Every structure is written in C-alpha cells, then in structure tokens.
Amino acid sequence: MKILVTGATGNLGSAVVEALKSENITLKAGARNPEKLSPGTETVRFDFNDAETFAPALDGVDAVFLQAPPMDPNSPALLKPFIALAAERGIKHIVFNSALGADANEKSPLRIIERTLMDSGVPYTITRPNFFMENFSAGFIAPMIAQASAFFLAADDAKTSFISVEDIAAVVAAAFAEGLTGKAFNLTGPRALNRTEAAALISEAAGKTITYNAIPEDAMLQGARDNGMPEGHVQFLAALYQAVRNGWTEPTTPDVEQVLGRPPVSFEEFALKNSNAWK
Ligand SMILES: NC(=O)c1ccc[n+]([C@@H]2O[C@H](COP(=O)([O-])OP(=O)(O)OC[C@H]3O[C@@H](n4cnc5c(N)ncnc54)[C@H](OP(=O)(O)O)[C@@H]3O)[C@@H](O)[C@H]2O)c1
C-alpha cells in the first residue's frame, strides 16, 4: 500500500509522514513546495488550486491522507474535484482530517467535505480532532510567544481538550494499517484546560514566564486582518473561537484510547517534549 499525504509540510501532515514511516507504510508526500520536505521520502508537487497536479500525485497510489487548506471557506469546492478523481481512479481508502464539532453544522466547510467524501464511493475514515497542542509550539500561536512571551486570543477562560498531532497521526496510521473504514473518530486530549493553565505549563517547561491575555473578538479578528488574512478566513477564525467561548471544545472523548490502546498525550508531556520551541 502506498499513501499520498496531502499538506505534508504542515503540523499534522509532517506528523502523519513520521507515523506512517514508523509503521513501515510506503508514502508519497504532497506539498505545494516539495523542496521544503526533508530528503529520504518520495515527494510530489500538489496544490488544490492547480488541478493539473492531482493526477501525477495519485499515480501509483492506493490511498490518500486528505486535509483541507486551513480555515479556507472555499475548501469544499477545492477538494470536490480531487475526491472525484480519486474515486474515478479506484483509490481504496481516504482518511480525511476534519475538525471536532464539524458534524454539528451541515453548512460548515469541513462537514460539506465529509459529506462529499461519504457520497464518493471511496472507503473513508474521518478524523475530527480538537485544537492542536502544537499550535503553541509550531503553529500560529508560536510567533506571538516568540515575540512577546505572551499570546493573545479571544478565548476568555474557556477550556479546551487540546490534542497532540502525534496522537492524531497515530490514529491516521492505524486507520490505514487496520482498514478502519466507514468510521469517524472524534479526537481529544486527556483533559481540558484553559489557556491560563496552558500558559503556566508552557512557562514551566520553557523555564520562563509566558502569559495568556484574553482579548475581545474584534481585536483578534483585526489582528488577523492586519497580518494579511483574507476576510473569508477571518470569519472562519471567528466561528472557531466562538465555539471555544461557548464551551464546545471542552469535552473529552475516549476515541484515541479506543483506537491506540493507550491514553492520549497530556499537555504536560507535550510541553516538556517541545520546550525548545519557547527558549
Ligand atoms: N490547528 C488546529 O488546531 C486544527 C484543529 C482541527 C482541525 N485542523 C485542520 O487540520 C488540518 C491541518 O492543520 P495544521 O494546523 O496542521 O495546518 P498547517 O500546519 O498550516 O498545515 C497546512 C498544510 O496545508 C497545506 N496547504 C495549504 N494550502 C494548500 C493548497 N492550496 N494546496 C495544497 N496544500 C495546501 C500547507 O502547505 P504549504 O507548506 O505549501 O503552505 C500545509 O502543508 C487543516 O485542515 C485544519 O483545518 C486544525
């Protein structure tokens, strides 16, 4: 079995590449700029905005790990022709990474993609993870911490059961290896914590004080616009943090442990392992 990994340069995509390698599963890493990928892996140029990259990416591939460009409200239209081509070419399994709670709103872009995949005829698995722990160490929060030893979010003191991409990637690898098709997994970390508690654990691991500042929604969205984020993405971001403030990202689920036979990584373990990111 050879698996095409889309978004292989990203936080989750790179963890999936590592998880598949550790299971000795052959893969082809797809990226808009394949030169960003580390050597030793077959790579291919892949861009959802360039349909000409789809067929070469699927050549010689049996299965696909599919991710949507983050926070893109246009992602259903981008992924639909790719899923159709995968079906036409007899791809045997697609694991699509959605997001926790996407299935609560039939109009949400990730839910529309889930539906497109479920209707495609391709055997599928859906992973729906909560917010990633790695947003703090390598994602969009990391530059704030590097610049200000602080991070600013419109999350009030809401709790979130953050999950490590390592656990999501391990579930993805198990889905391929064990053929866990026709299933959706809602993936969370082992406990919910608010962002003040997250900042304290990061501070302890980093050996310096890093603080969380709750800011109004308008300020967060204007900051995103000032950083060049397109308005559609800004509205997506608004919906994500409204869900956080509503408490919808607080529950924990047993799915990681049920698939992997071990509990998910704790925030403490994540912070210690990634402490160099904040030094
Ligand atoms: N971060 C979270 O807390 C979270 C929570 C739940 C679900 N998710 C979902 O999980 C997925 C991965 O998130 P992440 O945090 O790992 O994102 P990330 O680190 O920003 O990685 C995104 C990846 O998508 C690629 N990409 C962007 N636009 C593309 C396009 N037009 N065609 C092909 N590839 C494209 C990027 O490639 P380049 O290197 O070329 O930019 C990158 O490899 C996203 O779909 C996100 O919505 C994220």
Image (cartoon, helix red, strand yellow):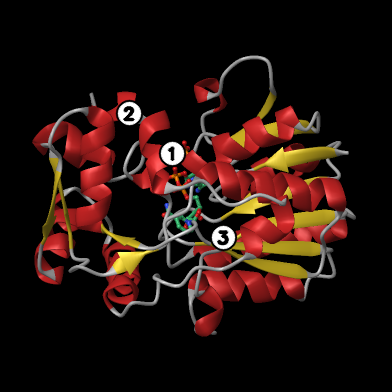
Q: Earlier in the sequence, mark 1 or mark 3?
A: 3
Q: Is mark 2 within 8 Å of ligand 1?
A: no
Q: Quadrant of the N terminus?
A: top right
Q: Is residue 200 left or right of residue 44?
A: left
Which circle marks residue 189 in the picture?
A: none
Q: Is residue 235 visible?
A: yes
Element at badge 3? helix
Look at the numbered discs 2 and 1 and tell me whether their residues touch, using CB distance below 8 Å.
Answer: no
Kind of residue indicated by mark 1:
Glu
Which circle marks residue 275 in the picture?
A: 2
Q: Is residue 263 left or right of residue 181?
A: left
Nearer the viewer's eye, disc 3 or disc 2? Answer: 2
Q: Earlier in the sequence, mark 3 or mark 2?
A: 3
Which residue does the image show at 57% across and 19% down from the upper left? 38
Q: Residues within 10 Å of mark 1 (few under 14, many from 20)?
A: few
Element at badge 2? helix
Element at badge 1? helix
Q: Earlier in the sequence, mark 2 or mark 1?
A: 1
Q: Nearer the viewer, residue 263 or 88?
A: 263
Residue named by callout 1:
269
Kind of residue indicated by mark 2:
Ser
Q: Is mark 3 within 8 Å of ligand 1?
A: yes
